[in-house]
Amino acid sequence: MNKVVADSSFYICFLDDIKRPEYLIRLLDHFEFVLGKIIHKEIKKSPNYSRIENIVKRKVLYFEYENYGEILRPFFSMEEIQKGEHEAIAIYIILVRIELLKVFLIIDDSNARKFIKKNFQNIYPMIKYTVQLIVECYLNHSIFKKEEIVEILELIKTSKFRINKNLIDHLLKNLKKGDRK
Amino acid sequence: MEIEISKEPQDENEVIERYILLFLGIVNRPIPSILHLEKEIFIFSNFNPKVKEFIHFEKHYEGPYSQEIKELVEYPLYFISAWEIENGKIKITQKGKNLFKKLVEIFKNDPKFKKILEVIRMIRELYDKLTREELLLLIYITFPEYKEKSKVFDRVYKKREEIAKSLFRKGLITEERYKEILDW
């Protein structure tokens, strides 16, 4: 099963920004998500966290004993630290290097992506945007139907979730053109 | 004489020397200075707070400092001649490389050990790139409690704009962190 490491904004996107926790539940059920302390603490603040609490307890791999965020904390701002971007990056790098598995890293913030590009060039091509993972779930994993993907992308486009809207338009255009493999 | 190394360390000093050896052996280049080694192990101890049970970091004139590390890197009790200090840099010797290999071999099936090695590798990959001033600036802004007894804080703080620019140019800090340092 593929592992996924994502920062808190990925979870908040489904829970609060587009208010579709049911889609997040499907993702949590399909992949093996990995959570660190900071990201877990942050998503627990969501008023809709109770919707995913059971599946998080049951299925998510929780790294609760070590402070992964501490490895990169000095290089990130307070706000970035709160979202857990630095923690997601550290967990991802350690996982990939130890397990040599296919692991997805979901990072949407351009500053965090630049940091990875500059300091961990070899993993940069493996990072995905939230919306890319969603489309991949339709194309390669049959987790979502096409109309659901379109709905999610349209909802994200009009939500406060910070993402380049052109990327969403591009993905929507490609979805309309082609079918899944 | 060949140094023996077993699964169980003999005492806390040997544990600390093992950490020094791991930091030196994981990347094929010297550690830039004792200051770097001290701060890198400090970062590691924040990742795994159990380390703080036997390595004690105190407030010192150059930020968090462990007397144990300083003494054991300069005068090791167990891994004698496993490393040497040359022009301020700490270099692993051939003897140290052999010991490092033995240590890795002993724990090769321990997933926790593999994780520790990768965390150490990551710390070295990033923190070795920092100059002394860059390292100190990031330590002081991240752990302000360590400013207290510092003799260099004022100098580093006055140069924060220049240091932050250098860090940002190298891609070592994010744009948000850069702005945060300027507003500090």
Image: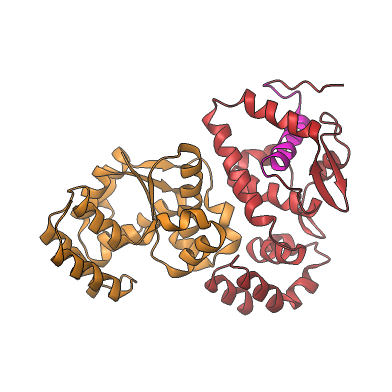
Q: Is residue B184 in view?
A: no
Q: Check the image and report above or below for A95 versus B113.
A: below
Q: How is the image coloured?
A: by chain
Residue appearing at x 74%, y 39% in the figure:
B20
In the rendered image, the quadrant that contains the C terminus of chain B is bottom right
Q: Quadrant of residue B133?
A: bottom right
What x and y, as percent, mark residue A72?
A: 57, 56
Q: Quadrant of residue A159?
A: bottom left
In this image, B55 relative to A32: left or right? right
Q: How many discs mark residues in the rendered view?
A: 0
Q: Is residue B120 in view?
A: yes
Majority secondary structure of the magenta segment? Answer: helix
Give, as a single range, the part of the protein colored magenta: B7-27
Residue appearing at x 69%, y 50% in the figure:
B40
Is B144 magenta? The answer is no
In this image, A38 relative to A132: left or right? right
What x and y, as percent, mark residue A106?
A: 37, 57
Residue appearing at x 80%, y 51% in the figure:
B34
What x and y, as percent, mark residue B57?
A: 74, 48
Chain identifier matching the red colour in the rendered picture = B
Q: Check the image and report above or below for B68 versus A40.
A: above
In the rendered image, the quadrant that contains the N terminus of chain B is top right
Chain identifier matching the orange colour in the rendered picture = A
Is B22 magenta? The answer is yes
Q: Check the image and report above or below for B50 versus A127.
A: above
What x and y, as percent, mark residue A4?
A: 36, 48
Residue appearing at x 54%, y 25% in the figure:
B109
